Image (cartoon, rainbow, N blue to C red):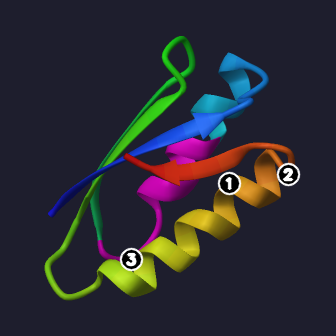
Amino acid sequence: MKKNYILEDLDCANCAAKIEEGIRHIEGVIECSVSFVTEKMMVEIEEGKEKEVEKQIKKVVKKIEPDTILREV
């Protein structure tokens, strides 16, 4: 299942790359793509693992960019 998010107030391209890399390492994530310019993120998640993965995504974003607001599109 593909999910799209807005990363509101994402500060830098380096942080976007760190978020993308961190999310790619979450069990159940098939693919992740983060665009610093558009502040958008696409995550493809294995079926049945959506809730677990979404909790981990929030943790990764807050750890790297505490002021960034994660919103599902």
Density class for disc 3 (Cα within 10 Å; few <14, some 14-19, many ≥20) is: few
| Between marks 2 and 3 in the image, the one whose residue lies nearer the viewer | 2
Q: Residue at x 71, y 29 (%)?
A: 10
Q: Is residue 20 left or right of residue 32?
A: right
Q: Is residue 12 left or right of residue 5?
A: right
Q: Secondary structure at mark 3?
A: loop
Amino acid beneath label 3? Glu
> Which residue has dot 1 on it?
61
Viewer-nearest residue: 21 or 40? 40
Is 58 located above or below residue 22 in the figure? below
Mark found first going from the N terminus, 2 or 1: 1
Q: Which stretch did the figure color magenta?
A: 19-28
Q: CA distance from mark 2 to mark 1?
A: 7 Å
Q: Residue at x 85, y 51 (%)?
A: 66
Rendered image quadrant of residue 22: bottom right
Q: Is residue 16 left or right of residue 48?
A: right
Amino acid beneath label 1? Val
The image shows residue 61 at horizontal and vertical percentages of 68, 54
Q: Residue at x 80, y 45 (%)?
A: 65
> Which residue has dot 2 on it?
66
The dot on residue 27 is 3
